[in-house]
Image (cartoon, rainbow, N blue to C red):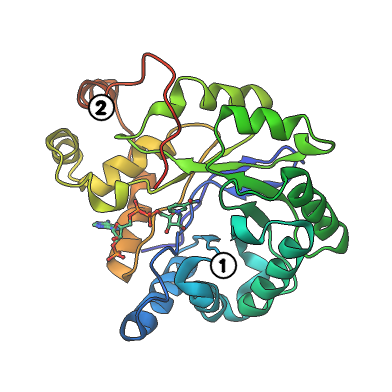
């Protein structure tokens, strides 16, 4: 497989990030699978996938160490996203958590650092910590995850809150709630959305409509689910693939062009929302 040309999305700062990357949730949980996980991520990098999404939570920090092993000397080519846990998101806690992540990642900077979900520390404290970390160069941009519209509004009203670079949320064919209000809110402000669990952790794969569209393209259901997200402007897709074969298959989604008929079939099986819905989370 030749190295892929991955499209990018613009961040509000004017910087860019790749629109397709690899997730790492559930990595680092089994010593037996570790080598395969490092190899899968490294294979992705070899194929031109330069975005990796991780978090201090994943494998209790072990996923970040796996990312470090996969990235090796290629740090400058890679866009690393990591996340602080809500219970660490006080001003001092966020800075300390970031320092621990940097050590595990064996790097001096995180490209995009997110609050994993809203916790009890005041949001203003997390924001102050993010701003301090940007100043020291420990992070290059910051964002949030699992924020609903009310929480985004609250954030936008804090000093400097409008610099939020992304909201990483659950978004796939079977979880289209954000299309009603959240997605338009971001589009209006030029803020990209990171779509997590893009194949619903595998639960989407047996769906008849996906299989039907996949057959039309000689593709797989996973590729159709990913292509459906990847075709949308301002959406960053981060499937987790623990094997080299899945990495290749998932990357192949970027070659697919869904037709109007395909989209109609998928809309019929997974209807878009007609009313506002509470934000789904995994
Ligand atoms: N911010 C948040 O709260 C949050 C929450 C959830 C996820 N995330 C991020 O988003 C990433 C992706 O979400 P996810 O891991 O929950 O779910 P996902 O990417 O929808 O699905 C991952 C699962 O699908 C399998 N898979 C991948 N490619 C496949 C293929 N081509 N054919 C068949 N199976 C395939 C993987 O198996 P193998 O491992 O065997 O390849 C794994 O079991 C996470 O890893 C994480 O980085 C963030």
| Callout 1–callout 2 Cβ contact below 8 Å | no
Answer yes or no: is residue 266 visible: yes
Residue 70 seen in this snapshot: no
Q: Give ligand 1's quarter of the image.
A: bottom left
* Residue tagged 1: 56
Crowdedness near tag 1: few (<14), some (14–19) or many (≥20) residues, C-alpha within 10 Å:
many
Residue in the image at 45% along x and 59% along y: 23
- Residue ID at (65%, 62%): 88
The disc label shown at residue 97, or none: none
The spot of residue 269 in percent (x, y) is 20, 26
Residue at image location 33% in from the left, 70% down from the top: 244
Question: Relative to residue 55, is residue 117 depicted above or below?
Answer: above
First in residue order: circle 1 vs circle 2: 1
Gap between marks 1 and 2 measured at Cα: 33 Å
Which mark is nearer the camera, 1 or 2? 1
Asked if residue 50 is positioned above or below residue 71 in the image, the reply reads above
Q: Please, which residue is most extreme toward the top here?
A: 274
Circle 2 Cα neighbour tier, 10 Å, few/some/many (<14 / 14–19 / ≥20): some
User: Residue 134: horizontal and vertical position, in percent?
Assistant: 82, 56
| Residue 209 horizontal side relative to residue 133, left or right | left
Report helix, strand or loop for mark 1: loop
Q: Of helix, strand and loop, which one carries label 2?
A: loop
Quarter occupied by residue 85: bottom right
Q: Which residue is mark 2?
A: 270
Label 1 beta carbon within 8 A of ligand 1: no
């Amino acid at each position: 497989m030749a190295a892929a040309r991955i499209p990018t999305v613009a961040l509000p700062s004017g910087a860019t990030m790749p629109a397709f990357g690899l997730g790492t949730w559930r990595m680092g949980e089994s010593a037996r699978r570790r080598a395969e996980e490092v190899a899968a991520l490294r294979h992705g990098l070899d194929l031109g996938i330069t975005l990796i999404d991780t978090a201090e939570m994943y494998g209790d920090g072990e996923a970040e160490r796996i990312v470090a092993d996969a990235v090796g000397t290629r740090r400058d080519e890679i866009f690393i996203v990591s996340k602080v846990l809500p219970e660490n998101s006080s001003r001092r806690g966020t800075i300390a958590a970031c320092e621990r992540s940097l050590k595990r990642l064996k790097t001096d900077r995180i490209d995009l650092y997110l609050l994993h979900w809203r916790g009890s520390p005041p949001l203003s404290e997390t924001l102050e910590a993010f701003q301090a970390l940007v100043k020291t160069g420990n992070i290059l941009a910051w964002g949030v995850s699992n924020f609903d519209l009310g929480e985004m509004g609250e954030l936008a009203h804090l000093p400097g809150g409008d610099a939020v670079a992304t909201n990483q949320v659950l978004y796939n064919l079977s979880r289209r709630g954000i299309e009603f209000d959240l997605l338009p809110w971001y589009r209006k402000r030029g803020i990209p959305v990171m779509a997590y669990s893009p194949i619903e952790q595998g639960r989407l794969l047996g769906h008849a409509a996906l299989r039907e569209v996949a057959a039309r393209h000689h593709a797989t259901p996973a590729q159709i689910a990913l292509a459906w997200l990847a075709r949308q402007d301002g959406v960053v897709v981060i499937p987790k693939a623990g094997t080299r074969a899945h990495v290749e298959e998932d990357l192949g989604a970027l070659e697919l062009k869904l037709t109007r008929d395909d989209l109609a079939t998928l809309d019929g099986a997974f209807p878009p929302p007609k009313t506002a819905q509470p934000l789904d989370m995994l």
